Image (tube, rainbow, N blue to C red):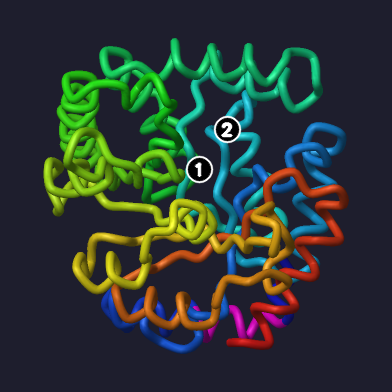
Amino acid sequence: MDRRQFLERSALAMLAGALPATGWAAHRGAARRWGLQLFTVIAPLEQDFEGTLRQIARIGYKEVETIGSFGRDPALVRGLLDKYGLVSPSQHIASTELYASFSAWSKRQISTEQNRANYVALLQPDKAAALVDEAIRSAKILGQSYVVWPILMTPHLATRDILDAFIRAFNAAGQACAREGLTFAFHNHDRELARLGNDVIYDLILKGTDPDRVKMEMDFYWFRKAKADPIAYLHNYPGRFRLVHVKDMAPDGDFTVVGGGIIDLKALIRKARKAGVDHFYVEYDRSADPMKEIRTSFDYLRKIG
């Protein structure tokens, strides 16, 4: 990210320090700190990690959300973020084993089915404590504030007993993060917005977890895919949502570049800010030209303010 001028950078830092967290998030300047979920550019990162971060910074992104530490030494990753003026407020949990599977899948070395099976096996509730502990260690080195559980797979939501085990694990994770000065959060897909018996799974997670210790990362695309109402959730749970994935949907239901689809992102972003969201990350799954698409997405967000 290009901070443009040292004086601008210093002024922003002084303002951030002068305001409480909620005031800074509500300030118009914070609205321009657009972020990028680095999954969007995983292929370029695998080819040229430092060069890709440099390009992201030059486009104008201020924040990035990592996938763990990308199987790398988190201190080295932090050094590169600092070098290019990038800040990383959050990470999606990715242990060494998880990232190895993800990386192999991204390079088409293993099938989607095998990667999913690996995620099902590795993201179990009885493994959550160890995963979160590893994430906390890397997050502190990376200067992050949030540790995000990235996904629940379909088998994880098969029964109420399994879901309840995850809810207990999330509460424990929230406590573990809080002890280290961090915050635990959960990132949704569409499957959590389906019903399990008579209840919406997402509602069970929201109501079953400690609102002070377990926050939410809303994904605009997956809410639309599930035909759920994100504005209603933002209204009903103020302060619960702290991060969002700004992701758009094509008319055929596929992913598309931010601003090029059918989701009213401007209205959602406006409501999310009022509801207490601090961090907005562009994400585009399966982009054919990720560096071009993240620039187009950034230009759109810059225009809407």
What amino acid is found at the position of numbered circle 1 in the picture?
Answer: Leu
Nearer to us in this view, 164 or 25: 164
> Counting other residues with Cα less than 10 Å from the Cα at mark 1, is it few (<14), some (14-19), or many (20 or more)?
many
Instruction: Report the disc number at residue 142.
Output: 1
Instruction: Locate the N terminus by quadrant.
Output: bottom right
Instruction: Locate the C terminus by quadrant.
Output: bottom right
Question: Which residue position is annotated with label 2?
Answer: 69
- Tell me whether circle 2 and circle 1 mark residues in contact (CB < 8 Å): yes
Q: Position of residue 2 (x, y in %)?
A: 74, 71
Residue 8 shown in magenta: yes
Quarter holding residue 134: top left
What amino acid is found at the position of numbered circle 2 in the picture?
Answer: Ser
Task: Residue at 78% x, 49% y: name it.
Answer: 287
Quarter holding residue 139: top left
Nearer to us in this view, 212 or 1: 212
Task: Residue at 72% x, 69% y: name it.
Answer: 297
Nearer to us in this view, 269 or 214: 269
